[in-house]
Amino acid sequence: MTGVQTCALPISFVYDNALLALWRSAHADLPGAGRVLATLACVQRPDGGWDFDFEASGAVERRPGYVRSGAVAWVLYAMARWQDASGDHRFAGTVARGWAWLEQRRGVAGLYTAGQGRWLPGGRFDADYRAPFAATEHQFDIWFALMARGLAEPGEAAARSEEHTSELQSL
């Protein structure tokens, strides 16, 4: 087929996997959602975030360093919705590490910075770059995750979701 680009490696995007897990959870396919979330738990970075994509070939090797707060939030949102629907807490450690990663990026006025990693001219990649800006889209991604976390983990998590709601309303 002409005009179709093929990839040398089967790449899977973290937020797409999170969306699939959300859809499966919403349609009562909790075992299927759990399998997708187990894959995401396996590719979680040691620092608690998720790279934007990973190799879907079964290899755990990743293209490290490009992490976006919104993608991390989608994974946490999917895990919270699944936990709420299933009552299963098997990803509690994964979720805690993910929230710790996000909270390290909480900056001025309670907004979360965009993440880390950037492409430079000439195709070079700077994995150590920490984005100093906050992206509006990511704030709402995180808001959805916080709201779901408040349902799955009442108490402090619910209070944090109300706090972020106030921060967004003040913009």
Image (tube, rainbow, N blue to C red):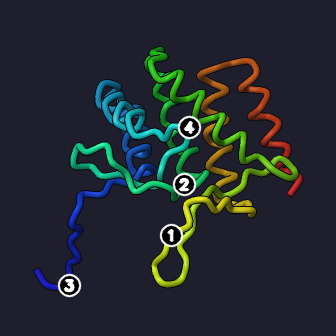
Q: Secondary structure at mark 1?
A: strand
Could you say where residue 154 lies in the image, as x and y percent from the top left? 69, 18
Tell which of 105 and 164 is nearer to you: 105
* Of the pair 96 and 163, the residue shown nearer to us: 96
The number of callouts visible is 4
Quarter of the image with the N terminus in it? bottom left
Spatial separation of the CA atoms under disc 1 and disc 2: 12 Å
Q: Quadrant of residue 13?
A: bottom left
Residue occupied by mark 2: 67
User: Residue 87: image x %, image y %?
Assistant: 48, 14
Left or right: residue 153 compared with residue 121: right
Give how far apart the Cα atoms at labels 4 and 2 are: 11 Å
Locate residue 60, reporting x and y percent.
31, 43
Taking the view exactly as shown, the residue that stands out farthest to the left is 1
Disc 4 + disc 1, Cβ < 8 Å = no
Q: What is the number of the mark on residue 48?
A: 4
Q: Nearer the viewer, mark 1 or mark 2?
A: 1
Q: Residue at x 57, y 68 (%)?
A: 118
CB atoms of marks 4 and 2 within 8 Å: no
Q: Earlier in the sequence, mark 3 or mark 4?
A: 3
Residue 120 in view: yes
Q: Is residue 48 above or below residue 12?
A: above
Q: Badge 3 is on which residue?
A: 3
Q: Secondary structure at mark 4?
A: loop
Would you name the residue on which mark 1 appears? 125
